[in-house]
Image (spheres, rainbow, N blue to C red):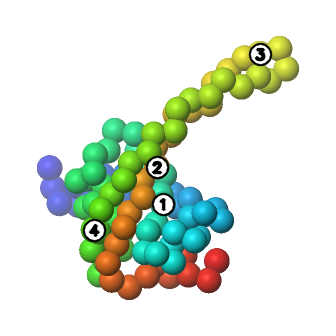
Amino acid sequence: MSKTAQRSELYNLLKRPIVTEKTTSLAELGQYVFEVERAANKIELTQAFELAFPGRKVRAVRLITVPARTKRYGKKIGQTQEKRKAVFSIEGEPIELFTGV
């Protein structure tokens, strides 16, 4: 597999940042929360984060699996999708995306 294919796969592991009141307070401590692919492991996520945000070194990654919930829409019963979140603890400069939110 070529390096560009590996890079594009790594970029796809990080889905979106999660910006809430709690994650904003964590950002002040150098911790950032992202929704990630369910099949990704900590090593791949560390590489993806360091590729997406150059100049930052990941100290630790914590993974949280949010289970699917049963929801009711009128008479129909369905389920939400299972999600996975990652909390990245970094050293280095803060990410501009999260400062001043």
Q: Nearer the viewer, residue 62 or 7?
A: 62
Q: Horizontal and vertical percent for residue 14?
A: 41, 55
Q: Residue at x 58, y 70 (%)?
A: 24
Q: Report helix, strand or loop for mark 1.
A: strand
What amino acid is found at the position of numbered circle 3 in the picture? Answer: Lys
Where is mark 3, residue-wise? Answer: 76
What amino acid is found at the position of numbered circle 1 in the picture? Answer: Val
Could you tell me how far apart the alpha carbons at marks 3 and 2 are, in whole angstroms? 28 Å
Q: Quadrant of the C terminus?
A: bottom right
Q: Report helix, strand or loop for mark 3.
A: strand
| Picture mark count | 4
Badge 3 or badge 1: first in the primary sequence: 1
Are there few (<14), some (14-19), or many (20+) residues within 10 Å of tag 2? many
Q: Horizontal and vertical percent for residue 5?
A: 24, 54
Q: Horizontal and vertical percent for residue 33?
A: 48, 60
Badge 3 or badge 2: first in the primary sequence: 3
Residue 51 visible within the image: no
Marks 2,1: beta carbons within 8 A: yes
Q: Residue at x 50, y 73 (%)?
A: 27
Could you tell me how far apart the alpha carbons at marks 4 and 2 are, in whole angstroms? 17 Å
Q: Is residue 12 above or below residue 66?
A: below
Badge 4 or badge 2: first in the primary sequence: 4
Residue 85 - label: 2
**Camera-nearest label, 1 or 4:** 4
Residue 33 - label: 1
What amino acid is found at the position of numbered circle 4 in the picture? Answer: Arg
**Camera-nearest label, 3 or 1:** 1
Marks 4,2: beta carbons within 8 A: no
Q: Nearer the viewer, residue 72 or 15?
A: 72
**Camera-nearest label, 3 or 2:** 2
Q: Residue 23: name its quadrant.
A: bottom right
Where is mark 4, residue-wise? Answer: 59
